[in-house]
Amino acid sequence: MLLPLMLAVSMAFGFWLGSGLKDPLVVDSNAGGWQKIDEILRYVEDDYVDTISRNDLEEEVIAYLLQRLDPHSYYIEQTNLQAFNEPLDGGFEGIGVQFSIRDDSVYVINTINGGPAQEAGMQPSDRIVKVEGELIAGTGITNDKVMRLLKGASGSKVNVAVQRSGEAEFVELEIQRGEIPITSIDAAYMVDPSTLYVRIARFAKTTAEEFTDRVVPFADQGVENLILDLRGNGGGFLDAATFLADEFLADGMLITYTEGRSRPRQDYRATSKGHFERAQLYVLMDGYSASASEILAGAIQDHGRGAIIGKRSFGKGLVQEQNEWPDGSATRLTVARYYTPNGRSIQKPYETMPEEDNFHGFSTNPTLDSAEKGGIEPDIAVQRDTASVSWLYAEAVHRGLLSDFAYHYRDHHLRSLLAMDEQSFLSQVSNDTLRKEMRTYLESQNVVINPDDWTKSAEHMTTRAKAIMGRSLFGDGIYFRVINTFDPYVSTVMAEIEKSAELSSGS
């Protein structure tokens, strides 16, 4: 197929374009080849009616070529490369604060535990008013501008002024920026004495280390069942996925294999190092679980090591290779496909490709059978929870009122909440109290409360608000501990565990 060659050569030409030098790779015009790309770009630059940036045009050509290959090959401009890499690199440099913009003001949702902002004394509910003496409140501030102001090289300092509830004067803080981790494991806790819940947000460079530090210690606590939550996990590094699979599969088991036109088959197998090889696995997936998540789930499913719970996964079975170029840009190019141990390709058809232009060999036929749709088909499907959803709930979510109430309650009870640890928060902040205050708050926001809707949704709304509040105080882990008490996926797993226990006891 010529397209990979076209891409490679166009990349080479891209760094010669605009240099005024003759490219040593250019072939004689009678021989065809890719001289045509260079000639057209030169022609446009010289003769187009308006002034054209040769560099901008070159980047658009490269981006277009990559987009034509498949949905997952793409070009990353130099200015965007750092932001693309941060989630998988496992960190960035800054002050370590989560914020939201409300009423044209920057409100602190949470500070990273042990991070620079927390060490300097910044608190949840603080309103950032000035940065380096510049007023940012009430100025049309954007997320991008806030990040540009607060991010910076580790060791550098930034001065901020915050308005704190109960204090008339601004609180001045000098914060020394540092390395801020982006964790890949959102939560790990025991649901009951024998069931461990682990949520993995992405497969990053730090995932193996995080799993070893945060999850492996539970192996000595009698874990019989393990709920591995991969919902919303769009993938990441193949090595991280195979490391995780190795924790659950016996020595020598095939985890996955990759193969491409210019990449010979490579097998990835489990070793004898797994800490949870005896635990019964339940892998939670949805339509946003992709790539490395599907590698892990496919291995578990093919070897019969556990049940896949939820919805069909996204269907991304392509391996991307990232190359960074001399000008600071990068490309992510599909170089191989990965397969489950039984040889299944998880890649779904390129549904956006027009039938007549489908030079990839992927069918766009909507009548494909289940095996041809791509993704991982769940062993136990979980339907959307509609029992507690009402028009009241929909309005509250649409208007962001559940988050607003969570922060409103937190800010009005901040002193007592900051004195709590996680367990105290879970036990002392009751749903009954929250429910009463939430209704009063919603009415103050001109929400008309239908009694039937309130009866149907109040518990769900209160639980979600408590989870949001807990996250702002203690981090992601407590959010999932709260929200999972009302989660249909987790409820399905717990029902399956109970069934298995009943069968084992012979009752």
Image (tube, rainbow, N blue to C red):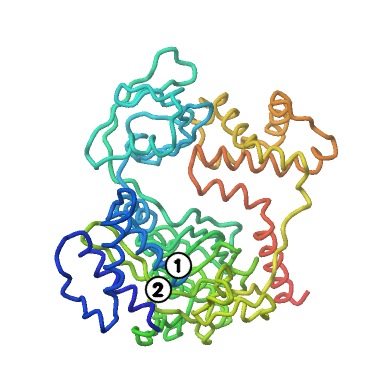
Using the image, tell me which numbered label, if any, was put on residue 169: none
Label 1 close to label 2 by CB (< 8 Å): yes
Where does the image place residue 209, in percent across and percent down from the top left?
35, 62
Where does the image place residue 14, in percent across and percent down from the top left?
26, 65
> Which residue does the image show at 59% across and 28% down from the upper left?
408
Where does the image place residue 125, in percent across and percent down from the top left?
49, 28
The answer to whether 216 is drawn above or below residue 415 in the figure is below
> Which residue does the image show at 79% across and 32% down from the upper left?
449
| Label 2: element kind | strand
The answer to whether 14 is drawn above or below residue 124 in the figure is below
Type of amino acid under label 1: His
Can you say which quadrant of the picture contains the N terminus? bottom left
Where does the image place residue 78, in percent across and percent down from the top left?
29, 54
Give how far apart the Cα atoms at labels 1 and 2 are: 7 Å
| Label 1: element kind | loop
The answer to whether residue 212 shows anywhere in this view is no
Type of amino acid under label 2: Thr
Q: Nearer the viewer, residue 251 or 155?
A: 155
**Mark 1, residue position:** 72
The answer to whether residue 391 shows anywhere in this view is yes
Can you say which quadrant of the picture contains the C terminus? bottom right
**Mark 2, residue position:** 334
For marks 1 and 2, the one nearer the N-term is 1
